[in-house]
Amino acid sequence: MLPHCTPWPEETAARYREAGHWRGETFGALLTRLAAEHADRVAVVAGTVRLTYRELDDRASRLAAGLAALGVRPRDRVVVQLPNVAEFLETAFALFRLGAIPVFTLPAHRSSEIVHLARHAEAVAYVVADEHAGFDYRTLARQVRDEVPGVRHVLVAGDAEEFTSLESVHAGADGSAFTGSAPSDVALFQLSGGTTGTPKMIPRTHDDYLYSVRASAEICGLTPDTVYLAALPAAHNFPMSSPGVFGVLHAGGTVVMAPQPSPTVAFPLIEAERVTLTGLVPPLALLWMETAKTTSHDLSSLRVLQVGGARFADTAAARVRDTLGCDLQQVYGMAEGLVCYTRAGEPQEFHLTTQGRPISADDEVRVVDAAGNEVPPGEPGELLTRGPYTIRGYYRADEHNAVAFTPDGFYRTGDVVRRLPSGHVIVEGRVKDQINRGGEKVAAEEVENHLLTHPAVRDAAVVAVPDRFLGERTCAVVVPRGEPPTPAELRAHLRDRGLAPYKIPDRVEIVDAFPVTGVGKISKRELRRALAARLAPTP
Ligand code: OOB
């Protein structure tokens, strides 16, 4: 395995192989197989681009050959920041073919995140789109290139300006001879929603990730007739693998890339491509349900709407069928591994009130109290998990790993759940210092550290405040140094520091001092309580 990653214990790995979970296939080999099985079926639709499996395979191979010619080697890390375009899949599979390792970042990330990740990963290349959603990624690339000299290549989907266009890297060479990496080695990096000052990197192996993809495709009943709309950014673990774009390809289906998840963009695509399945975070599901009431678009092809990433209110869940005319599947998962689904055929009640049950019979789940003891069945507690597709450690993060995992290898999710006798979980809250802003995760400490660099900030705490639409919004509570800074000044400061827009606090409150706990630490619980009492949820 790549250095600085934590492998599963040998006997555990052997057990996962024996059980047939880990099958010794790589994502590179998978595409070869799919191209043979589904040659002329459409694999991906993105704007005016339609690629069959054979074409996707061919383009990925040629891109791999071109990347090799540029000097990208097996195990090299490559930061990939692409929106939902065909190049997303071409690049992913080209890197898999080569055995180079994509670090998937969200289109919303900015210099603060990308520079850190490029350095931490010691990336040799950075792949971006020219422009997306009004943002010019070449500007960001210039900063990354200047600050991280190890990044030797910037590759651009579209107009490359002074950089290298992805299209030009598609060398004439045939890339079919690449052997790629070993199935037990790292295939890709996902990013953690995080609770710490900097985003953590999640190493996923071919064996473990392909297992979750294959099993997800089975659980969700995917077939070559599945048409999946990638509405959320494909780089995120949910639309990537639960079952997401990889699960749909695994089943020989068609992936339709939506550049934006708004109904204005998504509804015409559903109608035109006869989309059968898609996945959304709760605020988008609410928006779609509202818009569907008056839309003129034909959404009748849609069979299942998956909702996950944040808690979907039971009352909203109950309205999916009537408004969108399809079934609801709840998905509770995490980039670190564990994914839970409600399943077709289960009583409606499970779909409407639970977040599903784990993929695998070998997913071990413990629900524990603050002292680490298992709570009685049905009682709330923190969910700990280990299993055949849940990591044993973040990349190059020994200190954090010592607290994020138990000594016997369970990942501490930080989620508070109740578990039903059926194995279904209900997510009730969290003990981690994170804000879940409608599915977008904001690590409080990361934003606090940035706020503390402002000269007028003495101390800062970032907490969630309830919000009817997003579930939660971020609130930065600031103790000023002298003249209090205005919210606009603080937001501009964070933007200047290159923080992703979704992490910029929605609200800023100035206080004289923080409530403290018995040992003198900031009491976020008290702070949240005081704020919730003061701020009525936004209408
Ligand atoms: C997904 O992955 P991440 O890594 O962005 O976030 C994981 C965290 C979980 O630990 C939990 O706190 C929250 O997001 N979460 C949910 C949820 N799904 C995720 N909280 C309540 N209800 C749900 N249904 O968000 C993710 C990864 C794969 C599939 C689905 C979601």
Image (cartoon, rainbow, N blue to C red):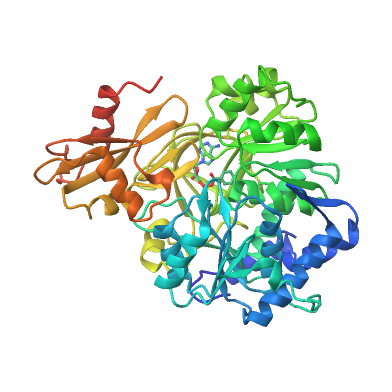
Residue 411 horizontal side relative to residue 268, left or right? left
Question: Picture quarter containing residue 189?
Answer: bottom right
Residue 21 horizontal side relative to residue 376, left or right? right
Please, which residue is most extreme toward the front here?
A: 161
Q: Position of residue 63 (x, y in %)?
A: 72, 71
Question: Picture quarter containing residue 331?
Answer: top right
Q: Position of residue 86 (x, y in %)?
A: 71, 55
Q: Residue at x 19, y 42 (%)?
A: 485
Q: Is residue 218 above or below residue 63?
A: above
Q: Is residue 4 above or below residue 288?
A: below
Q: Residue at x 53, y 57 (%)?
A: 105
Can residue 25 be seen here? The reply is no
Q: Position of residue 398 (x, y in %)?
A: 40, 68
> How many labels sit on residues?
0
Question: Picture quarter containing residue 80?
Answer: bottom right
Q: Residue at x 65, y 70 (%)?
A: 184
Q: Position of residue 288 (x, y in %)?
A: 62, 27
Q: Residue at x 78, y 54 (%)?
A: 250
Quadrant of the rendering where the C terminus is positioned: top left
Q: Which sits in the foreground, 284 or 408?
A: 284
Q: Is residue 473 above or below residue 498?
A: above
Can residue 124 be seen here? The reply is yes
Quadrant of the rendering where the N terminus is positioned: bottom right
Residue 118 horizontal side relative to residue 535, left or right? right
Residue 12 horizontal side relative to residue 394, left or right? right
Please, which residue is most extreme toward the left here?
A: 482
Q: Which sits in the foreground, 430 or 258?
A: 258
Q: Which sits in the foreground, 307 or 504?
A: 504
